[in-house]
Amino acid sequence: MKKVRVYELAKELNLESKILVDFLNDLGAEVKNHMSTLEEDIAVMVKEHFSSPEEKGSKIAQSVEIELEDVTPNYRLKNRMNKSGENSTREQHNVNKLHANKQSMQKKGQSHTSVPRSKELEIPETISVKDLAMKLSMSGAAVIKKLMSYGVMASVTQSIDYETAQLVCADFGVSTKPLKDLAETVFDDDTDDVPEQLQERPPVVTIMGHVDHGKTTLLDGIRKTKVTESEAGGITQHIGAYQVDYKSKRITFLDTPGHAAFTAMRSRGARITDIAILVVAADDGVMPQTVEAINHAKAAKVPIIVAVNKMDRPSANPDRIKQELTEYGLVAEEWGGDTIFVEMSALNLSGIDDLLDMILLVSEMESLTANPDRQARGTVVEAQLDKGRGPVATVLVTNGTIRIGDSFAVGNVSGKVRALLNDQGKNIKEAGPSQPVEILGISDVPAAGDILVVTPDEHTARQVAHLKQIKHREQELRQTATTSLDDLFAQIQQGEVQELNIVIKADVQGSLEALRSSLEKLSTDEVRIHVIHQGVGAVSETDVHLAAASNAIIIGFNVRPEPNAKRASDKEKVEVRNYRIIYNVIDDIKSAMAGLLAPDFVEETLGRAQVRQTFKVPTGVIAGCYVTEGKIVRSAQVRLLRDNVVVHEGILGSLKRFKDDAKEVAHGYECGIGIDRFNDLKEGDVIEAFIMKEIARTL
């Protein structure tokens, strides 16, 4: 067969010999220099790639030369060409020619096996050309040629993505499907339960609605407890999962926050629920978060029960509520629709029994079942880092039964169940479907909304977590690369953009997500909010060093800095701002960005006292304390810290030295401290005294 020298082919294609030699080496051809010879069929393939019936001559040669000069030896041409009818004909002609010259290819070490092809191939996310050729029982040259026709230049050892491999296989008449790894196999719930194994399970009910429409008060009335009093500003800021008994049946409730910033948390609550209770105040009407709650419930395709609350108010008008909700597709049954409306007053506990009856009625119609005799699956409702217990996750079991000692994978972390606590804080040995439970024994804090799956053994759980971590890392790298290019383009168009770097630390994962999302939405063309780090737990010394290196401020949401972090922040001159209510954070950042630098109140810490012993008196609880730092002043405000987490903020009810009232108690002395309207004092707690000073703000 006639052979062609490299320099002759380069001259014909109007290319430099060196460029063509590099190109052929990338394709796996044995070419040493410009005097090396090529088989005729290889030369034809190269000619057909560098020329087309529509465009011949120097333009194509020049464009190819430019592409080849700017790439490394691991060269890949990423621009895909649309196949025209003529190209398809030419490709088929080349395939036939390649089969005709099979013996010539075998001389080059590229053997053509005769293994029969399977009807459907399983292809991973990325696969090398060599492995794909082996799966297709084809020679490597045939696969490379097919890739060249798409404009993808890859050698035998290089990898291609699943979509490209799928195109190649389709052209050779072979269908494909993605190959699932161990993590995907474990997390994909494709096991069908036998109908005989299914048992009735409690309904999972989500209470949704606008701010201050009475959601937590309603749940409080159902549970006969006082949840609202412990929430900052009277607003629920963490998802709470609780279970109650009514008429010998159990009902699981999720209390989702009503503030607009917690959209993501409410969305998670709607995804794992069976019934949505939409609470609307009879004297207020439909508000923005009410509409948002309706949209989440409809997206989750769950039935909606409307609870018209605050019927005890003189201005209550339930008919107006029904009229407004008809605009969103919620028509009352008495008006010819299918939406259940219950008029009630959560404060007076009237109408609650009617609401619970309606929940049980809807759950019976929905036929809610699960199989308790299988490996458990669940959804993380909330997760946090507890100083004494380590990572803790509140999980709602969706199927199966989880027991102490079970190994599990959740998100990209794993663990083994060391302890299970129910919604009342009691230790239990197992938890079944629709039961909220607190799990101890996780290797790290998972993200709220992650799926938990029990695995056969601990080794499998660790493997699954490792695979998920690798995928998460690759995804982050891809996002980082994309963001960098976007930032570069934006800076070119807009000039230099000012950035406000922020480090966020919060007590739980859900608050962290919502706070970051809210702050990033405040970015403008002139000033951009950039969250360089976020995490769960107290502000640490590492966070301060990171903020100092990045010229960032630290926002602590419901957490306090550790003593070492406090000293480091003073030394590094890093600003650490502490908040308990999310819209205070948003308002401060907005004011700073808009230049509304009005006089501000800055907190000045006066001192700290450690609770050594507690005493019950007729008026409440008195804490016997030892002042460890500064001084405690009678007129100061106080903050109660338990494991560096803010439990309560208020004012001093009493300050005494022995039996006498004291205006202040200095460092190194003992005293008795009473906090106004707060009695949950425990040994080991820290009481921090502070005052608010008004100073002029500067940007």
Image (cartoon, rainbow, N blue to C red):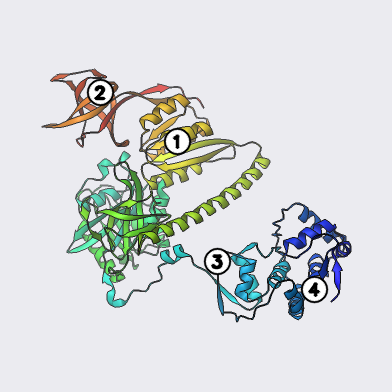
Residue tagged 4: 41
Q: Tell me which label, 3 or 4, sits earlier in the chain.
A: 4
For mark 1, what is the residue?
Answer: 543
Residue 2 drawn above or below residue 382: below
Q: Nearer the viewer, residue 636 or 471?
A: 471
Where residue 627 is drawn, which disc sits there? 2
Residue 481 can be seen in this image: yes
Sequence-earlier tag: 4 or 1: 4
Q: Is residue 157 left or right of residue 182?
A: right
Q: Position of residue 587 (x, y in %)?
A: 44, 36
Q: Of label 2 and label 3, which has the lower sequence position? A: 3
Q: Circle 2 sits in a helix, a strand or a loop, which is it?
A: strand
Front-lying residue, 345 or 272: 272
Which dot marks residue 124? Answer: 3
Image quadrant where residue 29 sits: bottom right
Q: Amino acid at mark 4?
A: Asp
Whole-number angstrom distance, CA of label 1 to CA of label 2: 28 Å
Q: Earlier in the sequence, mark 3 or mark 1?
A: 3
Q: Residue furthest left?
A: 618
